[in-house]
Image: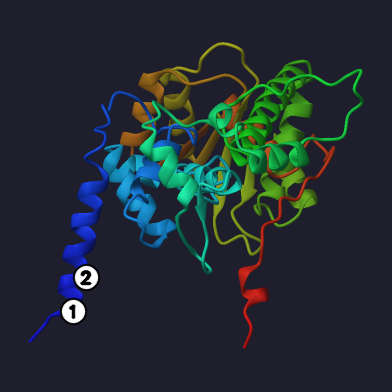
């Protein structure tokens, strides 16, 4: 009996292999940018059949010799894969230049123009190459903000997708804000720093309320411990805190003192917070002891303050939207 599924799979494999006889990608670089993906993407469609973005992502991942870790790498937001995002934008730009088309939802195929482009054997396809097509020029110009002729400048080409550009800009702003936070903290008093730590832990869900946590901080008088805070609202367990507003790295001796103080209180959990960093020896020691000690350095501290809105406030909010395909489904 004819095995239709097997025959279809074998035919697809033959088409995919034939598509890649054109090029062999020398794997000597990280995940390729979306412009580098354009030519291999169009070559993948050279069989004239309809393909899904998922199939294209899988085949191009093999073509570019991406490792499982590289295929799984996410954008900074964690909402989408880097390679999937770049493949998606390569498809969008090729479609805007009328080199491929979508005959129905979620599938696409090469157009007559796309086949002619491949027949010309281009060395590469990028944004500059696509500018020879009027449809792409119209798309590009419609995407630009309206500016006066006097201030108009040529838009620089970029290898990042729009999502990547937004997220990279956001990451840069976040890192700058984190550095400013640490500078401000170092200029404050030790008492203020203790209050800041309490505020942060309460915002993170510890301590029950700020009043309860504030009454405990800095009142133990025990060497190596700056405060105590409830692990939850019921106070089922207690966390001991050490807060160091330092500029130099915290070494293993300081962590050992803190652990000794915890053992003196028969405590099982502690958090050591510093505005600086930890030596490798200190970090290694904290991972090998029975007592659970969490080390939070200055970079991590600033990141938590940003995440939980401690010492910062929103300046602007941007919402990126995409098509809701389900809305357009006709029953």
Please tell me how many numbered marks the rendered image carries: 2
Secondary structure under the numbered disc 1 in the rendered image = helix
Residue 110 percent coordinates (x, y): 44, 53
Q: List the single residue furthest toward the top.
A: 248
Which of the labelled discs sits on residue 137, or is there none? Answer: none
Whether 98 is drawn above or below 128: the answer is below
> Residue 164, located in which quarter of the rendered image?
top right
Residue 292 percent coordinates (x, y): 42, 43
- Local packing at callout 2 (Cα closer than 10 Å; few below 14, some 14-19, many 20+) is few
Quadrant showing the N terminus? bottom left
Give the Cα distance between marks 1 and 2: 6 Å
The residue located at (35%, 28%) in the rendering is 285
Q: List the single residue furthest toward the left.
A: 1
Dots 1, 2 in contact, CB < 8 A: yes
Secondary structure under the numbered disc 2 in the rendered image = helix
Quadrant showing the C terminus? bottom right
Provide the residue designation for mark 2.
8
Residue 71 percent coordinates (x, y): 36, 45
Pick the residue in front: 48 or 267.
48
Pick the residue in front: 202 or 79.
79
The residue located at (34%, 45%) in the rendering is 60
Provide the residue designation for mark 1.
4
Whether 234 is drawn above or below 328: the answer is above
- Local packing at callout 1 (Cα closer than 10 Å; few below 14, some 14-19, many 20+) is few
Q: How is the structure coloured here?
A: rainbow
Residue 252 percent coordinates (x, y): 41, 20
The residue located at (42%, 28%) in the rendering is 124
> Residue 219, located in which quarter of the rendered image?
top right
- Camera sees residue 81: no
- Camera sees residue 98: yes
Whether 285 is drawn above or below 55: the answer is above
Pick the residue in front: 270 or 218.
270
């Amino acid at each position: 009996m004819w095995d239709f599924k097997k025959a279809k799979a074998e035919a697809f494999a033959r088409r995919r292999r034939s598509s890649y006889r054109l090029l062999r990608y020398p794997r000597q670089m990280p995940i390729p940018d979306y412009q580098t993906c354009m030519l291999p993407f169009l070559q993948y469609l050279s069989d004239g059949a309809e393909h899904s973005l998922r199939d294209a992502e899988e085949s191009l991942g093999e073509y570019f010799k991406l490792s499982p870790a590289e295929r799984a790498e996410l954008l900074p937001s964690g909402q989408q894969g880097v390679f999937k995002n770049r493949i998606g934008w390569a498809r969008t730009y090729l479609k805007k230049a009328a080199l491929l088309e979508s005959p129905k939802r979620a599938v696409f195929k090469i157009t007559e123009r796309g086949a002619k482009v491949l027949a010309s054997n281009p060395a590469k396809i990028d944004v500059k190459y696509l500018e020879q097509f009027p449809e792409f020029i119209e798309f590009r110009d419609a995407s630009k903000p309206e500016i006066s002729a006097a201030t108009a400048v040529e838009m620089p080409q970029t290898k990042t997708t729009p999502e990547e550009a937004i997220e990279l800009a956001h990451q840069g702003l976040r890192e700058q804000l984190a550095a400013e936070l640490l500078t401000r903290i170092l200029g404050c008093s030790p008492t203020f720093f203790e209050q800041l730590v309490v505020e942060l832990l309460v915002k993170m869900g510890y301590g029950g309320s700020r009043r309860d946590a504030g009454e405990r901080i800095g009142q133990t008088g025990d060497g190596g411990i700056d405060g105590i805070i409830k692990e939850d609202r019921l106070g089922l367990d207690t966390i001991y805190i050490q807060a160091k507003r330092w500029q130099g790295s915290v070494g293993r001796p300081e962590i050992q003192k803190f652990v000794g103080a915890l053992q003196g209180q028969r405590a099982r959990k502690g958090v050591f917070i510093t505005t600086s960093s930890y030596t490798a020896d200190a970090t290694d020691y904290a991972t090998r002891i029975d007592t659970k000690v969490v080390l939070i350095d200055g970079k991590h501290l600033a990141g938590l303050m940003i995440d939980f809105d401690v010492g910062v406030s929103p300046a602007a909010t941007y919402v990126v939207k995409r098509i809701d395909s389900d809305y357009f489904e006709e029953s």
